[in-house]
Image: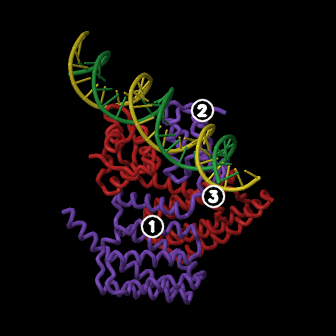
Chain colours: A red, B purple, C yellow, D green
Amino acid sequence: MKTELDSTREYSQQIAQAIRDEIVAGALPVNGRLPSEGELAARFNVSRPTVREALKRLAAQNLIRTQRGATGGAFVNQLSFAQAQEHLVTTATLLLSMNAIDFETVCEARFALERACLPLACMRRGPDHLASLRAEILRQNADGLSDEGFCASDVAFHRALVDAAGNPVLSWHMAGAVEAMQPLMNMITFTARSRARIVGLHSRLADALEQGAVVEASCALEALAAYTLELGGEIRARRAGVLG
Amino acid sequence: MKTELDSTREYSQQIAQAIRDEIVAGALPVNGRLPSEGELAARFNVSRPTVREALKRLAAQNLIRTQRGATGGAFVNQLSFAQAQEHLVTTATLLLSMNAIDFETVCEARFALERACLPLACMRRGPDHLASLRAEILRQNADGLSDEGFCASDVAFHRALVDAAGNPVLSWHMAGAVEAMQPLMNMITFTARSRARIVGLHSRLADALEQGAVVEASCALEALAAYTLELGGEIRARRAGVLG
DNA sequence: CAAAATATAAATGTCAGACATTTATCACAG
DNA sequence: CTGTGATAAATGTCTGACATTTATATTTTG
């Protein structure tokens, strides 16, 4: 069956769209194999390079993967949360870097999202979640930890917090928000005193979570948000300095 | 300057990555023009079709756009929230459809995110936001509205609610969550009684927002979440029926 | 002299055919 | 029965060409 294309628009774009639609509609099942490039070329009445451009578009979105060899071809990917997360992070990072979103906005969004997870996390946190939180707190207390290391551990802490809510969709969103924010966070220089304060709040959070104390947890998070904003003020000052 | 590539991996993938890195690092400014396909081919020591595959990968992520003609070429896109939103919706939709996420999980995530916006929305909602909310409520009360129309208005209502928080990053996340959920919501059949109940809760929410009553708003939202879950039960039953 | 028509050049979009490489499968020899 | 090589199918890549679009320079014309 040949499929007509609109000759005023790019073929590769239309072909990619057509295949994407088939995938979304379920006509091509997960792990199912697409027709070979040659067959697709015949079906859409275009050349193989054009088909390949279309397939690369889909590959860029992790919708398909390709395998070489006799039984090779293009296969429909099962989009995993991990892949979707990568995507989200890439998009979020670009969005922040190209639209000059200020630290305050990102910070506010992030903590708002996180606060949304707290009630669920208090209900559902298991011993493994608590252990993860405690482990990160320990790491953050270690001597000789670089600012970047501290940041990374901070991210891990908050991801554990969100994961404790036991909702993969929430975790997905949060991971995107937190990771996209990391480049900004990495610009902060953490003094010994500010680290102590942050770790103290982390401990409060972990304790509250362990006891299932939603209100206490919210307060701790609120304090953490306020303090992070305060530290972020430095960034703006430094940025202004660089630009001026 | 020629750039070396790893001959064991796909060239187009590596080239796309290299260009993406340059964009993210800011070496290629927004609306800046990339070298022509021929120049890129020379730089990476590959053929033009290979370069084109790489560019299509980037185009699929809205990172670049291309123009034909004498002064044409590939230009770095300013990633807008709208485009990023499309992306997020596509990814979220696929994620839900291919991983068999249940209605409860999506619903929970969505309302958790929305609840996170309430305090901000109560603080910042302007008259235009309130007007949007009221307008949707009116629409939802209209006679002869189809289920799909009701759903669409519901989405619009909740988006207005989130926009009232005045944080574009939050709005971005929420739009993804809500829109991805719409196909599931569209499976619900709304009786006159259930519509009345939902609209009633919407009114409560709008009133609370107008008065800046965070607690009241949260309660209303909580009730809405619970009722939506209840209605969602139908979906599961029907699905089971279809599958069995 | 000015404005419209035309030629030119540069870039992307597309095609055709070929070769290289990878990989599963099957036949065959030991 | 097992290992090895031939085979075939598919993707990955290259070359060279032509088509199309579009800005710019040039020429022609009123």
Determine the residue positioned at 77% across, 62% down.
Answer: A240
Vertical arrangement, residue D23 with respect to residue B216, above or below? above
Determine the residue positioned at 60% across, 81% down.
Answer: B124
Q: Position of residue C22 (x, y in %)?
A: 40, 29
Q: Secondary structure at mark 1?
A: helix
Q: Position of residue A221 (x, y in %)?
A: 59, 71
Depth order, front residue of A13/B235: A13
Q: Position of residue B207 (x, y in %)?
A: 50, 89
Number of marks:
3
Mark 3 vs mark 1, foreground winner is 3
Asked if residue A141 can be seen in this view, the reply is: no
Q: Which quadrant of the structure image shows residue C11?
A: top right
As drawn, which residue projects farthest toward the left? Answer: B244
Asked if residue B193 can be seen in this view, the reply is: yes
Q: CA distance from mark 1 to mark 2?
A: 43 Å
Q: Position of residue B84 (x, y in %)?
A: 52, 60
Vertical arrangement, residue A201 with respect to residue D25, above or below? below
The residue that mark 2 highlights is: B42
Determine the residue positioned at 51% across, 38% down.
Answer: B12
Depth order, front residue of B83/B106: B83
The residue that mark 1 highlights is: B177
Q: Are marks 1 and 2 in contact (CB under 8 Å)?
A: no
Left or right of residue A98, residue B205 in this image: left
- Chain letter for the residue marked with disc 2 in the picture: B
- Among numbered discs 1 and 2, the one appearing first in the sequence: 2
